Image (cartoon, rainbow, N blue to C red):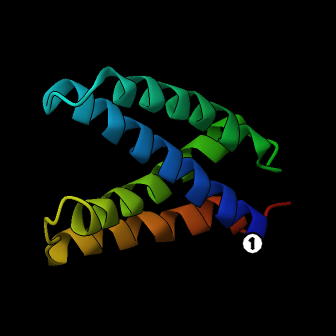
Amino acid sequence: MILSIMLFVVAGLAEIGGGYLVWLWLRESKPVGYGIAGGIILAAYGIIPALQTFPSFGRVYAAYGGVFIAMAVAWGWLVDKKTPDFYDWLGAAVCLVGVSIMLWAPRS
């Protein structure tokens, strides 16, 4: 379970961080190197979730989506300095509960 969580977090950082670098390049006129680095990191993001041990592609990516939402709220708060409100945190918590159900519910 720890490895799964770590892979989701690393994938989230790669997706959000890579996207952020591309954003800085295109929207805030940073040098093209930001865009190139962002593209490389986004390509790595495409590989990282495939390292999960769960057998179902759809389930892994659906669960990752919930983790991504929570991480994006935290990124906005820590990096963009946009304080999330109660409903941002509540929505992220609901997503994480859904992720837990999807991945770790007992199945026969």
Residue at 22% in and 31% down: 30
Q: Nearer the viewer, residue 90 or 102?
A: 90
- Please identify the residue farthest to the bottom as the structure is shown: 86
Q: Quadrant of the C terminus?
A: bottom right
Give left or right: position of 52 versus 6.
right
Q: Quadrant of the N terminus?
A: bottom right
Residue at 82% in and 43% down: 55
Residue 1 visible? no
Q: Is residue 27 above or below residue 95?
A: above
Q: Is residue 43 above or below residue 2?
A: above
Pinpoint residue 7: horizontal percent, then vertical percent: 68, 56
Q: Which residue is mark 1?
A: 2
Residue 35 visible? yes
Q: Residues within 10 Å of mark 1 (few under 14, many from 20)?
A: few
Q: Nearer the viewer, residue 72 or 31?
A: 31
- Circle 1 SS class: helix
Callout count: 1
Q: Is residue 106 above or below residue 21?
A: below
Q: Nearer the viewer, residue 47 or 101?
A: 47
Pinpoint residue 54: horizontal percent, then vertical percent: 79, 49
Residue at 34% in and 37% down: 21
Residue at 32% in and 61% down: 75
Pinpoint residue 107: horizontal percent, then vertical percent: 79, 62
The kind of residue tagged 1 is: Ile
Give left or right: position of 87 versus 43.
left
Pinpoint residue 83: horizontal percent, then vertical percent: 14, 72
Give left or right: position of 52 versus 22.
right
